[in-house]
Image (spheres, rainbow, N blue to C red):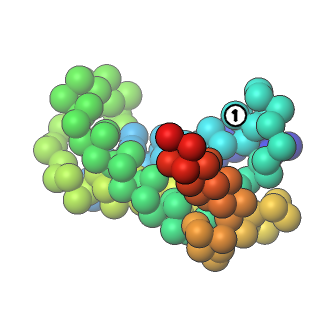
Amino acid sequence: MPFTPFHFGPGLFFGIPFRKYIHAPTFILANVLLDIEPLIVLITGINYPFHGCLHTFAAAIGVGTIFGLAMSILERSMQPVCVKLMLEPDIKFSKLQFVTAGVLGTLLHVLFDSPLYSDVKPFTRLAQTRSMALLTRLRYTRSASG
């Protein structure tokens, strides 16, 4: 099955012990975040690999960085709940700690999926992925016609 909740386990296993150094909720959610790609493929039925461009190390770094920054913005509203659930200590985290948590979480996801699924190509550059080629083609088609 290309889309599972099993990434919560490693997220909790590694995130909780390091919650004084990285933002654990960001790390845990980042471990699951990349499975949005196979979920979209399953729901829409598009002709696209379950583990496409998001399941590369290059994309994981980019997605993790953006996710970490977004979580740092949302921290104020989430902190009371996270402290009650003991997911994070009652301390202020820096943006770097959020970004580090996001990047490490998405990289761990790709690392764990790599030996399990044959369509995961973690070292593929984004420009070589089928989805990036499709997006580039769509962009040039639109610019040429309009």
From the top left corner, tell me how far across and down residue 30 is, in percent: 48, 47
From the top left corner, tell me how far across and down residue 65 is, in percent: 36, 56
Amino acid beneath label 1: Ile
Badge 1 marks a residue whose secondary structure is: helix
For the residue pair 88 and 125, the one nearer the viewer reads as: 125
Instruction: Please say if 145 is above or below 84.
Output: below
Q: Quadrant of residue 37?
A: top right
Which residue is depicted at the point 64% across and 76% down?
123
Which residue is depicted at the point 15% across and 43% down?
91
Give the residue number, with chain letter if any, for mark 1: 40
State which quarter of the image contains the N terminus. Answer: top right
Instruction: Please say if 8 is above or below 120.
Output: above
From the top left corner, tell me how far across and down residue 116 is, in percent: 81, 61
Which residue is depicted at the point 26% across and 31% down?
74
For the residue pair 5 and 126, the one nearer the viewer reads as: 126
Which residue is depicted at the point 28% across and 27% down?
78
